[in-house]
Amino acid sequence: MLCLVPTPIGNLEDVSKRSLQVLQECELIFCEDTRVTKKLLSLLGEKNNLDFSNKEYKSYHSHNEKKVLETLSKETFTKNVVYVSDAGMPCVSDPGASLVDYCIKNNIEYDVLPGANAVLTAYAMSGFESTTFSFHGFLDHKGKQRASKLDAILNDNKLAILYESPHRLAKLLEELKDKAPNRTIFLAKEITKLHQTIYKNKASNLFEEFKNINIRGEWVVIIEPLETIGSALELKDIQDLDLAPKVKAKLISKLTGQSTKEVYQQLLDTI
């Protein structure tokens, strides 16, 4: 079977006993970077007096996953197989989803262990009371796609969570300052690590503050949703308006997706 095992995002104490047991018992480890995983297991072995030797390692990441999948068969999963990303929960802005999909399509047993995750940890840290959020991973580095994605985030009524590297955080804060200076932004640096730090302020204030900061580490950014005033427009609201049938038909058409002609005829039939 396949088991997806989350790894610590910083603090080694965050690995679960169950994860350690699965890693100790597995025979084959698919991993985002074999060097990172071997080093992690070496540290975990020393810390917990465990033996992680005699494992087979195979690289599995976004650049080679299609080729690796072509080499797999049901026979591969007669072993105890594990997948780990470099840090945190597999499939969350990390590879692994294609392996899960392969198992589903081929009726192969699999499991996912709970564990460390920067998205949910930062969400709980933020103090935002929104109960819905969208996760965007890393934005494109530059160009129209980055600009349009950021515009979509700023015009959404859901809390937005994304990752950012230290090299581009200043750029993101400048973009947020220009596009939504009064929007509240939460930043979390190096979650669970020694230099974990959080900030929460308006975009314009954070931009000014970070001018004098040497930006290092990995960051989670949470953006306050667009404030909506009043309740959403409903069909009955339009039907009750004292408007000409043609105008009312156009509004209802946009709201429902029906053709304007159909709606117009329905309105005439009710007169």
Image (cartoon, rainbow, N blue to C red):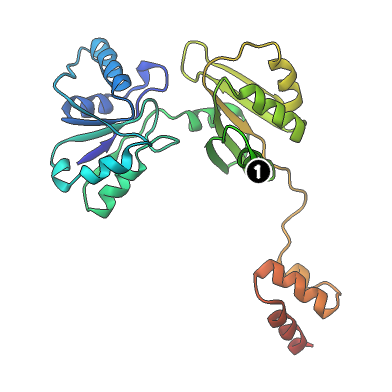
Residue 190 vertical position relative to residue 185 in the rendered view, above or below: above
Whole-percent x and y of residue 97?
36, 43
Answer with left or right where residue 235 lies relative to residue 164: right
Residue drawn 30% across the image and 18% down it: 40
Q: Quadrant of the C terminus?
A: bottom right
How many numbered discs, if any?
A: 1
Q: Between 151 and 108, which is closer to the camera in this rendering?
A: 151
Residue 76 vertical position relative to residue 250 in the rendered view, above or below: above
Q: Which residue is mark 1?
A: 148
> In the figure, residue 201 lies in which quadrant?
top right
Q: Quadrant of the N terminus?
A: top left
Element carrying mark 1 = helix
> In the figure, residue 48 lies in which quadrant?
top left
Residue 251 vertical position relative to residue 79 in the rendered view, above or below: below
Q: Is residue 219 visible?
A: yes
Answer with left or right where residue 150 lies relative to residue 59: right
Whole-percent x and y of residue 239?
77, 74
Residue drawn 49% across the image and 32% down it: 120
| Dot 1 amino acid type | Ser
> In the figure, residue 248 lies in which quadrant?
bottom right
Residue drawn 43% across the image and 36% down it: 92
Residue drawn 27% across the image and 11% down it: 47
Q: Between 144 and 12, which is closer to the camera in this rendering?
A: 144
Binning the other alpha carbons within 10 Å of mark 1 as few (below 14), some (14 to 19) or many (20 upward) gives: few
Whole-percent x and y of residue 119?
50, 32
Whole-percent x and y of residue 163?
54, 30
Q: Is residue 180 visible?
A: no
